[in-house]
C-alpha cells in the first residue's frame, strides 16, 4: 500500500498493512519548532530555516526529508488564516504583541517565548448587543486568496502517494466566539442571554460556510479529509453541559457538517475536541463526524479500550497514540514505548486508527522520546 491507500483503508474501518502515521498535517497534530529542530539534529538531517504552519503555536511544517524518513502518511493544506498570515509582532517591551484579523490581541514573551497567548478579545466589554456584533469588522473568510497554490500542492502530495487533509480558517463555533467575545462573557451569555450567544454562534457558522463554499468546489476532489475543530472537554468533564451543547451548538454544527459533506462527498470529516467528550460522541456521530481527534486518553471517561468497544464501529480515532502531558515529555524512552503499545493494542484492531500523539508535540519533548514512539509504532 502507498500512504494514501493506507489512510483510506483505515478510514473505512479496515486494517491496512501497517498503522498510518501523522505528523504535522494539521495545527493540532504537529510539532513545536524547538522539538522539530532537535529531532532533525538527532536524526542527522541538515539544519533548515523552518516553515511555520502556525506562528501562534510555533508549529513547524515537516520538511520532505523528515516526512520520507519517518514514513508520514498524510500531508496538510494550510489556508491563510490568523495563525499563519501577516503575523507581525510589535515590540512592546516584555512582549511581542500581535493583533490578528479578528481584532484579538496576542502576546509572546521576550526573548524566547514558546508561543503567543491571547490577552484581549475585541468584544469583551459588557454589555454587548447584537448591533455591536453586526457592526464588528470580521475578516473575509471567503477570499480565494486564502487557498492560492493549494490545489497544486495537493496534487503534488497525491503524486507522492500521500493522503491530503485541509483545515479551515477559523477556530470552532464555540471557541471562535470565545476569542471574539471573551470566554467568561460567552459562557455567561449562554446562561443568561441565549439570543446573543446564538447570534455569535450563527456568525461563526456563516463565516465557516463562506470559506468552505469557496474552497471545497476548488479543492474537494484533491483532498481526502476535511478538518474542523471545537473544544468542549476538560481533563475531567466538559466546559458546558451536554444539554447546553445539544441546545446551542449541535444544531449549528449539524448545518455546517451537512454542507461540508455535500461539498466534498468523498472526503471524511475530522473533528478535533480535547478532553472528556465521551458524553458527546453519540452526538458527533449523529451529525456526521467521521474522525475524532485528539483522543485524550488520560482524561476521565476516555479510556481507549472502552472507546474502541463502544464507538469503534462508527468513528475513526486519530490520535491517542501516546500521552503528551506527562509520558512523552517526562518519561523514559521505554515508558514512551510501553504507553504507545498500550494505546495501539486498544485502538488499532480492525482498523479505524491513525497514529498521532494526544495533541501537538511540545518544545520540551526530547528527540529520543519522539523516536521511541516511532520505533514502538513500527514494531511488529
Image (tube, helix red, strand yellow):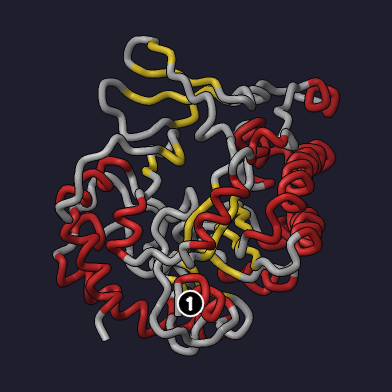
Find residue 281 and report its horizontal and vertical position in percent.
62, 71
Residue 173 against residue 380 in the figure, above or below: above
Q: For this view, does 11 lie left or right of residue 207? A: left
Q: For this view, does 345 lie left or right of residue 195? A: left
Find residue 155 and report its horizontal and vertical position in percent.
57, 56
For image coordinates 66% across by 31% down, the residue present is 181
User: Quadrant location of the C terminus?
Assistant: bottom left
Query: How many marks can you see?
Result: 1
Is 167 in front, or is 349?
167
Find residue 377 and report its horizontal and vertical position in percent.
30, 75
Say if residue 193 shows up in the picture.
Answer: no
Residue 33 against residue 71 in the figure, above or below: above
Q: For this view, does 135 lie left or right of residue 191? A: right
For image coordinates 75% across by 37% down, the residue present is 142
| Secondary element at tag 1 | helix
User: Quadrant location of the N terminus?
Assistant: bottom left
Is 242 in front, or is 258?
258
Find residue 133 and report its horizontal and vertical position in percent.
78, 27
For image coordinates 19% across by 50% down, the residue present is 45
Quadrant of the image occupied by residue 320: bottom left
Quadrant of the image occupied by residue 9: bottom right
Q: For this view, does 154 lie left or right of residue 259? A: left
Residue 200 against residue 267 in the figure, above or below: above
Badge 1 local density, few (<14 within 10 Å), some, or many (20+)?
many
Say if residue 97 shows up in the picture.
Answer: yes
For image coordinates 80% across by 42% down, the residue present is 206
Q: Which residue is mark 1?
A: 6
Residue 150 against residue 160 in the figure, above or below: above
Amino acid at each position: 500500500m502507498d500512504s494514501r491507500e493506507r489512510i483510506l483503508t483505515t478510514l473505512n474501518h479496515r486494517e491496512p498493512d501497517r498503522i498510518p502515521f501523522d505528523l504535522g498535517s494539521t495545527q493540532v497534530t504537529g510539532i513545536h519548532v524547538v522539538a522539530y529542530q532537535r529531532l532533525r539534529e538527532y536524526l542527522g538531517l541538515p539544519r533548515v530555516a523552518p516553515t511555520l504552519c502556525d506562528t501562534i503555536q510555533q508549529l513547524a511544517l515537516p520538511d520532505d526529508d523528515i516526512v520520507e524518513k519517518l514514513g508520514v502518511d498524510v500531508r496538510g493544506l494550510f489556508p491563510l488564516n490568523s495563525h499563519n498570515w501577516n503575523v507581525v509582532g510589535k515590540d512592546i517591551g516584555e512582549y511581542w504583541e500581535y493583533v490578528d484579523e479578528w481584532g484579538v490581541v496576542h502576546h509572546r514573551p521576550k526573548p524566547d517565548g514558546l508561543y503567543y497567548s491571547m490577552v484581549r478579545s475585541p468584544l469583551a466589554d459588557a454589555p454587548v448587543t447584537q448591533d455591536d456584533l453586526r457592526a464588528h469588522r470580521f475578516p473575509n473568510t471567503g477570499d480565494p486568496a486564502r487557498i492560492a497554490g493549494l490545489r497544486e500542492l495537493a496534487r503534488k502530495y497525491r503524486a507522492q502517494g500521500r493522503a491530503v487533509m485541509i483545515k479551515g480558517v477559523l477556530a470552532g463555533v464555540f471557541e471562535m466566539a470565545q476569542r471574539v467575545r471573551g470566554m467568561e462573557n460567552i459562557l455567561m451569555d449562554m446562561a443568561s442571554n441565549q439570543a446573543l450567544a446564538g447570534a455569535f454562534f450563527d456568525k461563526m457558522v456563516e463565516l465557516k460556510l463562506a470559506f468552505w463554499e469557496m474552497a471545497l468546489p476548488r479543492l474537494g476532489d484533491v483532498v481526502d479529509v476535511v478538518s474542523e475543530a471545537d473544544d468542549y472537554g476538560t481533563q475531567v468533564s466538559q466546559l458546558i453541559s451536554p444539554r447546553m451543547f445539544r441546545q446551542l451548538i449541535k444544531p449549528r454544527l449539524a448545518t455546517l457538517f451537512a454542507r461540508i459533506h455535500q461539498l466534498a462527498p468523498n472526503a471524511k470529516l475530522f473533528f478535533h475536541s480535547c478532553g472528556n467528550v465521551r458524553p458527546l460522541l453519540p452526538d458527533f456521530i449523529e451529525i456526521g463526524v467521521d474522525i475524532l481527534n485528539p483522543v485524550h486518553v488520560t482524561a476521565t471517561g476516555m479510556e481507549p479500550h472502552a472507546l474502541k468497544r463502544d464507538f469503534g464501529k462508527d468513528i475513526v480515532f486519530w490520535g491517542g497514540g501516546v500521552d503528551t502531558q506527562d509520558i512523552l515529555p517526562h518519561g523514559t524512552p521505554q515508558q514512551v514505548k510501553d504507553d504507545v503499545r498500550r494505546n495501539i493494542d486498544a485502538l488499532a484492531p480492525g482498523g479505524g486508527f491513525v497514529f498521532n500523539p494526544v495533541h501537538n508535540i511540545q518544545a520540551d519533548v526530547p528527540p529520543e522520546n519522539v523516536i521511541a514512539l516511532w520505533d514502538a509504532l513500527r514494531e511488529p
